[in-house]
Amino acid sequence: MDELELFSLDLQLFAEGGEKTEKATPRRRQEARRKGQVFRSMDLNSAVILLLGFTVLYFTIPGMLGSIQDFLTRYFTDRALTEFNTAFVYVMMLDAIVLMAKLSLPLMGAVLLAGLVVNLLQVGFIFSAEPLIFKPERLNPVEGFKRIFSKRALVELAKSILKISLVGYVVYTVIKKYFYIFARFTDMDALAMVRVLSLIIFEMALKVGVILLAIGVLDFIYQWWEHEKSLRMTKHEVKQEYKQTEGDPLVRSRQRQIQREAAMQRMMAEVPRADVVITNPTHFAVALKYEAEEMSAPVVVARGQDFLALRIKAVARENQVTVVENPILARTIYYSTDIGDVIPENLYQAVAEVLAFVYRQKKKAGSR
């Protein structure tokens, strides 16, 4: 019997901590982000950079060709070659550097901006040194083989084959479409040939970019799904995290009980200093205190129902605090106020009559 119970207990623990079926909690997501575990699609980055880069290139090529033509005319004509000397070479090299910077700056700026924007849109701003920390398990060959033949690696392989196939098909169709024009290059000047080639390359890049963009969007969805799956938690992990963040329910219950007991002790300590306790007489008890120099109206210093009401009356009698039975007034004060509240204005007259009665009783007792 003991072995059977132990076996049953082990199975329960196994079932509780095994399968990850619960969605990640905000704390789990925050911890993963702190460690740099975020999802993003590199294919989406590449597609946007390719499209924007070639679009910028398409609109800047005419200006590039004009600048290059001016440079060649300036430094490689017969007149320029006859004046060839050290100073000439120095000026030519400076102009070449400036020209290269002017030609490459729009393209480089567009590519850099596209990369930053796409990354920010996917993962936001994040800095984590966690991925750079050396971990000995990364040198484990067994784990390396597992990564090589993992589901992620197979997906990446299938994606690469798909991209190569589609890009190859696009390149083939575009070349086939313009194949007739290649034979006419011999009749064109260099500038016209470059313009035609740029149009062909731009069409090819545009079609490839659109295909890669579609693949990138699908890859982004897949990366999100895989990231969500990797963050899933077991029911046991969710319970443990809840205990860590919110505290053990038993501990919190005990804390609330201690707080209630402390509040009750403070309240009962105020009863001996009250002027009067108004009762139901058995179900409600309200203790009032009034100091004309400090208070604008009587204040409720203690209140209770049933057992607590009996306890308030007992403490009041032990400390010679007057107990007055007025069921309607006791219930009204109990339901309309809390400890530390001033009684409502509509009860001023009734409470004043009770206090006047109490003061008369105390005056008579003192005169005796």
Image (cartoon, helix red, strand yellow):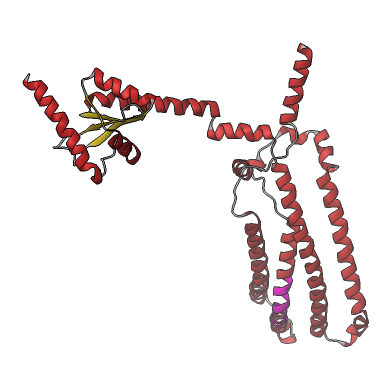
The part of the image, by quadrant, that contains residue 8 is top right
Residue 363 at what x, y percent from top left?
Answer: 9, 26
The part of the image, by quadrant, that contains residue 143 is top right
Residue 181 at what x, y percent from top left?
Answer: 90, 83
Task: Residue lying at the far left in this picture: please name it.
Answer: 367
State which quarter of the image contains the C terminus: top left
In depth, the one of 284 and 121 nearer the eye is 284
Residue drawn 34% across the image and 26% down it: 282
Residue drawn 91% across the image and 71% down it: 172
Q: Main secondary structure of the magenta part?
A: helix
Residue drawn 26% across the image and 40% down it: 343
Residue drawn 36% across the image and 29% down it: 283
Q: Is residue 163 magenta?
A: no
In depth, the one of 242 and 116 nearer the eye is 242
Res. 297 visible in picture: no
Image side of residue 345 versus residue 30, left or right: left
Image side of residue 271 versus residue 245, left or right: left
Image side of residue 230 versus residue 262, left or right: right
- The correct choice, above or below, for 216 with respect to 362 in the image is below
Q: Is residue 57 magenta?
A: yes
In depth, the one of 226 and 16 nearer the eye is 16
In depth, the one of 146 and 7 nearer the eye is 7
Residue 227 at what x, y percent from top left?
Answer: 71, 47
- The correct choice, above or below, for 170 with respect to 332 in the image is below
- The correct choice, above or below, for 245 with respect to 313 in the image is below
Res. 367 visible in picture: yes
Residue 256 at what x, y percent from top left?
Answer: 45, 29
State which quarter of the image contains the N terminus: top right
The count of marks equals 0
The part of the image, by quadrant, that contains residue 334 is top left
Q: Which residues are magenta?
A: 54-68
